Amino acid sequence: MDRTAPLRRDAQRNRERLVAAAREVFAERGLDVALDEVARRAGVSIGTLYNRFPNRAELVAAVFADREETVVRITEHALAMPDPWAGFAHLVEQICRLQAADRGYNDLAARRVPQVATPPRGHTLMTQLIARAQDSGALRADFVLEDMMFVTWAITRTIEATSQISPNAWRRHLALILDGLRAGAAHPLPEPPLRPEQAVQLLRDR
C-alpha cells in the first residue's frame, strides 16, 4: 500500500480516531497496552488499526509527533527568561511535567529522551540554554546535553513508582537533582560525559 498517497475521507477519519484513542489509552496505561484496546476505544477493528499502523512504533510516533515541537517551544521560552539558571530549570521542570501528566509519554521518555531526540533546532536551542547557564556561573561547567539523559531517566522511574500514591513526588526528586547541578555544589566527576555518538547508540539500543 502506498502510505504517501492522500487518504480517503473515511480512512482519514479512522486514522484520526485511532490516534486520538491511542493518545488516551497510552496516557492511562502506558505504551505497552494491548493494541486491541486502542482499536476498541477507536471503534474500529484491529485489522483497520494494522492497516493504518503496521506496527506499534508507527502508532507511537503518530501519537507523540507534536511533543518534539512542544519541547522546542518550551526551550525557546526558557531562553527568553532573563535569569539563565531559571531558564534551564524551567526547561527540565516542564519536560518532567509533561511526563508526569502522561504515562505513555513517561514510558517514551524512558526509552527515547526528549531533550536529546529533538529536531535540529531544538538540539541547538538546548545547547545554547546550557551554555548560557554555564556562562552565568550558575550551572556546573562540566554538564553537557547528553547528561540530560540521566536526569530524565531518573525522573521517569520516580514518576512510575510514585504516581499512584504521591503524584508530585517527582518534584522533590527533581529539586534534589537540580541542586546537584548548581555550580556551587560541583565536585570533580569520576567519569567523562557520554560522547554524542554514544548517546545516539544508547537511544537506538533502548
Image: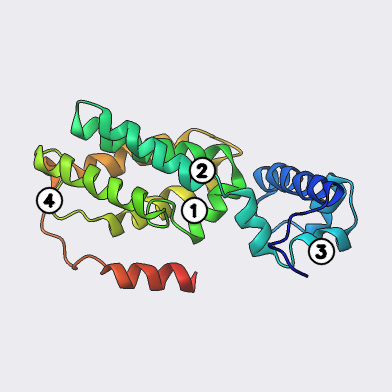
CB contact under 8 Å: marks 1 and 3: no
CB contact under 8 Å: marks 4 and 2: no
Residue position for label 1: 109
Q: Distance between the residues labelled 1 and 4?
A: 25 Å
What x and y, as percent, mark residue 182?
Answer: 17, 41
Amino acid type for the residue under numbered disc 1? Ala
Residue position for label 2: 99
Amino acid type for the residue under numbered disc 4? Ala
User: At 41% from the left edge and 70% from the top edge, which residue is drawn?
Assistant: 202
The image's mark for residue 141 is: 4
In-image side of 60 versus 72 (left or right): right
Q: Is mark 3 on a helix, strand or loop?
A: helix
**Residue 139 is at least partly visible in this image:** no
What x and y, as percent, mark residue 180?
Answer: 22, 45
**Residue 203 is at least partly visible in this image:** yes
In-image side of 28 versus 106 (left or right): right
Which label's residue is closer to the chain start, 1 or 3? 3
Which label's residue is closer to the chain start, 4 or 2? 2
Residue position for label 3: 51
CB contact under 8 Å: marks 3 and 4: no
Compared to 114, does 75 lie above or below? above
Front residue of this view, candidates 68 and 205: 68
Of tags 1 and 3, the one toward the viewer is 3
In-image side of 79 versus 17 (left or right): left
Q: In which quarter of the image is residue 60?
A: bottom right
Q: What element carries label 1?
A: helix
Of tags 2 and 3, the one toward the viewer is 3
CB contact under 8 Å: marks 2 and 1: yes
Amino acid type for the residue under numbered disc 3? Asn
Amino acid type for the residue under numbered disc 2? Gln
Q: How far apart are marks 2 and 3 (CA)?
A: 29 Å
